[in-house]
């Protein structure tokens, strides 16, 4: 799709604060072996024949052993979750009827990326042709959250204020300690093979205004660096097509409750950033190198580690940093009626604990798939 930056400004001008869209990516699995299987097209085509609502919610990702469902625009977090619960139920019912299992961790624990087939779309052909090994290597699964923001300048300023928060959101979402049949000792192997490999990815610069961000995009376009906006893969970005701020830093979540809780925290962070911007609360953009230092801590240690408090210049346990984040977002959470806490062990912590207790890697993954298949398939509450 050609990049129309004038249209993007109009899209943000017409946007509504705190609308929400959810995007969840799942691994498509053989139910006996739990190996990745290339059956995305089968699920999509079956939905097209049997379930038009689900068909409209399905999107393809890089590999044919991955499927994504989207909520569409929700008027608020609760509306988006209600839509997504319905779409999950439909997807998991369809998959079960076709003897397909679905997994939800940031990376598959033992799959060989060289055996995965890429889907055949113009966008992903361009990605694979342009990035080669970097694209082929990226067999990962994420949760993305879109939050509506009125005004392109406000959207860029929200992204700026979320930069130092990205490592915390990654740490609390980490669910991918295993890769290629081994314990990587990381909490988010997904981030290491995606965020640290793709161009225009990870922690963005602080731009300060839409004009500065637009200048950056126009340079990329003029120099042939990008031909479509989605080739800008930053972990937080103003989305050109939807008038949203999109947060892309999180691993896919093992359970539906974790996915919804994480989405709630993300929405609260955007909401509080908007409140602070509108009220003129002072903010100093931290150096990129220090945000990246915390990003590495999140990748390596997740919630078992500590973060650098960038204001005080000291270390703070990751759990205490999350508690400060929770306190900061209290006004926005109250306004949006968000009352979901993430106080249990993360997916990565649970998986590594099971491994240390004597389970082998395949048994650990089987447990996560059972959790995913049970919790995401639940009916919409009455």
Image: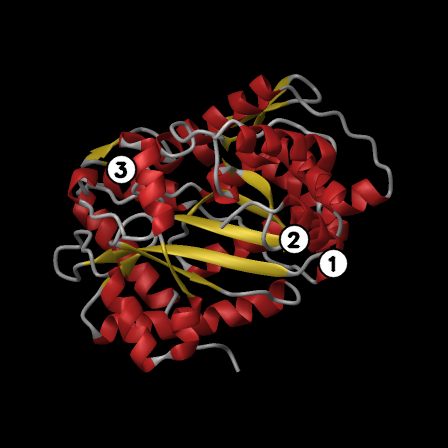
Task: Check disc 2: other Cα within 10 Å, few if <14, some if 14-19, many if 20+.
Answer: many
Expressed as whole percent of the image width and height from the top left, the position of residue 41 reads 25, 63
Q: How far separated are the C-alphas under marks 3 and 1? A: 37 Å
Quarter of the rendering containing residue 163? top right
Residue behind mark 1: 14
Residue behind mark 3: 136
At 24% from the left and 49% from the top, the residue drawn is 365
The label number, if any, that marks residue 243 in the structure image:
2
Task: Check disc 3: other Cα within 10 Å, few if <14, some if 14-19, many if 20+.
Answer: some
Between residue 171 and residue 30, name the one nearer to us. Answer: 30
The answer to whether 365 appears left or right of 197 in the picture is: left
- Of the residues under marks 2 and 1, which one precedes in the sequence? 1
Q: How far separated are the C-alphas under marks 3 and 2? A: 30 Å
Expressed as whole percent of the image width and height from the top left, the position of residue 229 reads 52, 43
At 38% from the left and 40% from the top, the residue drawn is 349
The answer to whether 354 appears left or right of 363 in the picture is: right
Callout 2–callout 1 Cβ contact below 8 Å:
yes
Q: Secondary structure at mark 3?
A: helix
At 12% from the left and 55% from the top, the residue drawn is 33
**337 w.r.t. 185: above or below:** below
Task: Check disc 1: other Cα within 10 Å, few if <14, some if 14-19, many if 20+.
Answer: some
Quarter of the rendering containing residue 57? bottom left
- Of the residues under marks 3 and 1, which one precedes in the sequence? 1
**29 w.r.t. 139: above or below:** below
Q: Secondary structure at mark 1?
A: loop
- Of the residues under marks 3 and 2, which one precedes in the sequence? 3
């Amino acid at each position: 799709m050609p990049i129309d930056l004038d249209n993007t400004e109009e899209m943000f001008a017409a946007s509504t604060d705190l609308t929400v869209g959810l995007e969840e990516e799942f691994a498509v699995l053989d139910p006996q072996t739990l190996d990745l299987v290339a059956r995305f097209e089968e699920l999509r085509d079956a939905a097209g024949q049997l379930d038009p609502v689900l068909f409209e919610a399905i999107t393809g990702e890089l590999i044919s052993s991955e499927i994504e469902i989207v909520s569409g625009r929700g008027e608020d977090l609760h509306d988006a979750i209600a839509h997504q619960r319905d779409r999950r139920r439909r997807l998991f019912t369809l998959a079960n009827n076709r003897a397909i299992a679905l997994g939800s961790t940031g990376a598959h624990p033992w799959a060989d990326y060289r055996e995965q087939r890429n889907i055949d779309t113009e966008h992903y052909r361009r990605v694979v042709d342009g990035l080669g090994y970097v694209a082929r290597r990226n067999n990962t699964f994420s949760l993305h959250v879109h939050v509506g923001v009125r005004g392109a300048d406000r959207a860029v300023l929200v992204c700026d204020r979320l930069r130092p928060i990205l490592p915390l959101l990654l740490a609390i979402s980490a669910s991918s300690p295993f890769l290629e049949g081994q314990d990587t000792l990381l909490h988010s192997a997904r981030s290491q093979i995606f965020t640290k490999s793709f161009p225009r990815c990870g922690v963005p610069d602080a731009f300060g205004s839409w004009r500065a961000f637009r200048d950056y995009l126009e340079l990329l376009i003029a120099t042939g660096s990008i031909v479509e906006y989605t080739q800008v893969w930053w972990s937080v970005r103003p989305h050109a097509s939807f008038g949203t701020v999109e947060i892309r830093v999180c691993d896919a979540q093992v359970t539906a409750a974790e996915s919804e809780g994480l989405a709630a925290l993300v929405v609260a962070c955007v909401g509080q950033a908007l409140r602070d911007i509108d009220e003129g609360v002072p903010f100093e953009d931290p150096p990129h190198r220090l945000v990246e230092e915390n990003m590495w801590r999140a990748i390596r240690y997740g919630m078992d580690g500590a973060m650098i408090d960038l204001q005080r210049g000291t270390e703070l346990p990751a759990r205490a940093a999350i508690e400060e984040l929770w306190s900061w977002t209290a006004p926005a959470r109250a306004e949006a009626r968000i009352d979901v806490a993430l106080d249990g062990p993360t997916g990565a912590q649970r998986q590594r604990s099971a491994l240390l207790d004597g389970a082998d890697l395949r048994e650990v993954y089987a447990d996560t798939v059972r959790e995913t298949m049970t919790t995401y398939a639940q009916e919409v509450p009455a």
